[in-house]
Image (spheres, rainbow, N blue to C red):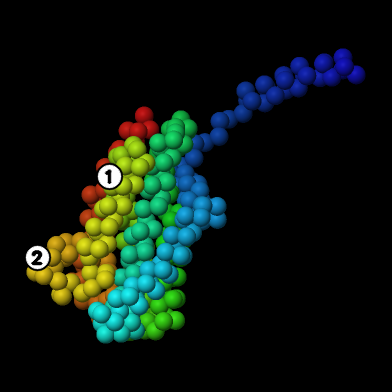
């Protein structure tokens, strides 16, 4: 029995070598396939990484309840009245805060050598960035719907109706994708995860609380109002409010779309370039 098995091994090895020699190499994965793979990797984190799910669900609920009942009476006279102004803004706030999660995860993966293996594979290297942000669509949708549903229960009534709310949510997907390039830029630029997280959180704080999310910009001092108007988050909040309440001016819509375009043009090319250099 031993001799027969010994004789079978060379025969099997010969058959295997012949089959491998005559086989064609499988084609390299295309950009779309690579993007889809990394998008799926991002989606499954909703199930296994608690921070991602908590940021998408718990964080928006806490923000909506705390700011509505803490500031509502002082700013608008009652929490219900303030909710009509604040809820579109809190969705923007939650999305901007949520958009930095994938960037910081990418920064940790690069720092720990997770993507050292990726650079040796024959894939379209920017797929790591594009696929990761594409996979965040579901998380962004969840982050948008949770505070919206809570707001409707608390008394939020969008005058723009269902179509206005739907258009607002679609615009927010575009804006969140655009602002994600800003966080990705710092995630790729700064090698230390702690330093990257510190800078991203500081910049996020400035963008969010230096906007018209919490209070109308018309109530601010002139110099501060001028600064707030330059903030892309301000234009996103204004566009979202206008779409949900059905009173969006064409100029505000143009400014909201322009803010998305500027973020992509300024930060997408250098981010892809920096990431490509790290892969060499």
Tell me the SS state at disc 1. helix
Q: Which of the 4 quarters of the picture holds residue 191? A: top left
Check disc 2: other Cα within 10 Å, few if <14, some if 14-19, many if 20+.
few
Q: Residue furthest right?
A: 1
Give me the residue at 27% from left, 69% from top. 213
- Position of residue 162 measured from the top left corner of the image (x, y, whole percent): 40, 80
105 to 143, vertically: above or below? above
Which is more toward the observer, 183 or 257?
Answer: 183
Q: Residue furthest left?
A: 222
Q: Nearer the viewer, mark 1 or mark 2?
A: 2
Instruction: Note whether residue 140 is visible.
Output: yes
- Position of residue 240 measured from the top left corner of the image (x, y, whole percent): 30, 72
81 to 19, vertically: above or below? below
Q: Which of the 4 quarters of the picture holds residue 106? A: top left
Q: Which of the 4 quarters of the picture holds residue 78? A: bottom left
Give me the residue at 33% from left, 72% from top. 67
Residue behind mark 1: 269
Give me the residue at 84% from left, 19% from top. 5
189 to 216, vertically: above or below? above
Determine the CA span between mark 1 and mark 2: 32 Å
Check disc 1: other Cα within 10 Å, few if <14, some if 14-19, many if 20+.
few
Mark sitting earlier along the chain (1/2): 2
| Mark number displayed over residue 223 | 2
Q: Is residue 160 left or right of residue 261?
A: right
- Position of residue 276 measured from the top left corner of the image (x, y, whole percent): 34, 36
Tell me the SS state at disc 2. helix
Question: Looking at the rendering, in which quadrant would you find the N terminus?
Answer: top right
Question: Looking at the rendering, in which quadrant would you find the C terminus?
Answer: top left
């Amino acid at each position: 029995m031993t001799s027969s098995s010994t004789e079978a091994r060379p025969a099997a090895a010969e058959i295997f070598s012949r089959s491998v020699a005559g086989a064609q190499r499988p084609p390299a994965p295309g950009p779309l396939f690579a993007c889809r793979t990394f998008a799926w990797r991002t989606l499954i984190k909703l199930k296994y990484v608690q921070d991602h799910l908590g940021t998408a669900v718990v964080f928006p609920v806490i923000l909506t309840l705390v700011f509505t009942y803490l500031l509502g009476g002082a700013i608008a006279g009652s929490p219900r009245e303030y909710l009509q102004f604040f809820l579109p803004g809190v969705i923007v706030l939650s999305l901007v805060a949520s958009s930095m999660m994938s960037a910081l995860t990418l920064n940790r993966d690069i720092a720990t050598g997770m993507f050292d293996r990726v650079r040796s594979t024959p894939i379209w290297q920017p797929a790591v960035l594009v696929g990761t942000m594409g996979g965040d669509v579901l998380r962004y949708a969840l982050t948008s719907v949770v505070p919206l549903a809570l707001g409707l229960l608390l008394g939020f009534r969008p005058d723009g109706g269902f179509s206005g709310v739907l258009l607002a949510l679609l615009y927010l997907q575009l804006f969140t994708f655009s602002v994600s390039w800003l966080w990705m830029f710092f995630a790729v630029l700064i090698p230390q995860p702690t330093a990257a997280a510190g800078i991203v959180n500081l910049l996020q704080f400035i963008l969010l609380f230096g906007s018209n999310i919490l209070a109308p910009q018309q109530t601010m001092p002139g110099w501060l109002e001028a600064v707030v108007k330059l903030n892309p988050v301000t234009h996103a909040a204004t566009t979202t409010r206008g779409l949900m309440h059905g009173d969006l001016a064409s100029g505000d819509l143009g400014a909201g779309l322009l803010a998305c375009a500027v973020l992509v043009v300024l930060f997408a090319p250098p981010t892809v370039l920096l990431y490509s250099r790290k892969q060499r």
